[in-house]
Image (spheres, rainbow, N blue to C red):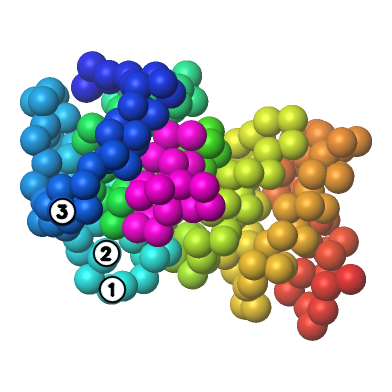
Amino acid sequence: MISMKKMTKAQAKEFVDSVDKLSDVAFVDLTALWHAHSITIENPDYEELRRKVLDAYEEAAATNDGYQIDLDVGLCLFEMLSPEKGFTLVMANDDDIWRYLSCKIFPDITYERYPKPAKDDIRLNKKRFYLHTRRIWLKTLWWYVFLAWQGDTKKTRAVLKDFGTDTISDFIERTGQGYRVLLYRQLMRSYATVENKSSDLFNVIQKQNLVNCRTVEPGLVEGAEQGYVDSLFKQLSVGEEHVD
């Protein structure tokens, strides 16, 4: 297991600010290195992680499909940094670990995935690099895969393959009072069987689920999580011609 390094929010801000302060020529030179995936890794413990994730990224990037990139990078990242390999949920929730990965190990692919600065940013998308706990790109991908995990990579890919980028943010950001792991894994398994998927439909499901979970504990209903998701879909007419 890699001895995970950390980068505080202040340190990550210094990194982004240093890029923002570059001259136009220097910034072009830097991004040319990033596009060539020429990154100097100071800590050799990260070399295998970078190599495998970069391979997954480059293969997916050839499709020019943003969701395919997210899915392939997320699955590879989770395989390399899995709980079974010692990457605990406490570590997975530590933004300082993800900031280090974003700014020191994978600044190139983070930039390539989000090349346009957000509002009030200068050159780099701060939220995706370090600023917003539920928008740090690599962190969101890891949690997306973890919460949808079906026991192995092949089964998880089969469940997630037909979703989209909006699903990731909708899934990660609507936590309610916390993640119910078994519920979310069942929800994604059931949603994968729905023919007419859409961002709007997934939003409706997520919102209604949050409402229901204020008064219902899914694991305690008849049929446990599967029974609850079945009733949730029936409540919303999911799989029928319309959603009430």
Magenta part of the chain: 113-131
- Whether residue 72 is visible, yes or no, is no
- The quadrant of the picture occupied by the C terminus is bottom right
The residue under label 1 is: 63
Name the amino acid, label 1: Thr
Splitting the image into 4 quarters, where does residue 239 fall? Answer: bottom right
- The quadrant of the picture occupied by the N terminus is top left
What is the CA distance from the residue labelled 2 to the residue labelled 1?
Answer: 6 Å
Q: Residue at x 31, y 73 (%)?
A: 64
Q: Residue at x 68, y 62 (%)?
A: 202
Q: Position of residue 93 (x, y in %)?
A: 49, 25
As helix, strand or loop, the secondary structure at mark 1 comes to loop
Q: CB atoms at circles 2 and 3 under 8 Å apart?
A: no
The residue under label 2 is: 60
Prevalent SS, magenta region: loop
Q: Residue at x 63, y 59 (%)?
A: 190
> Is residue 102 or residue 217 the one in the foreground?
102
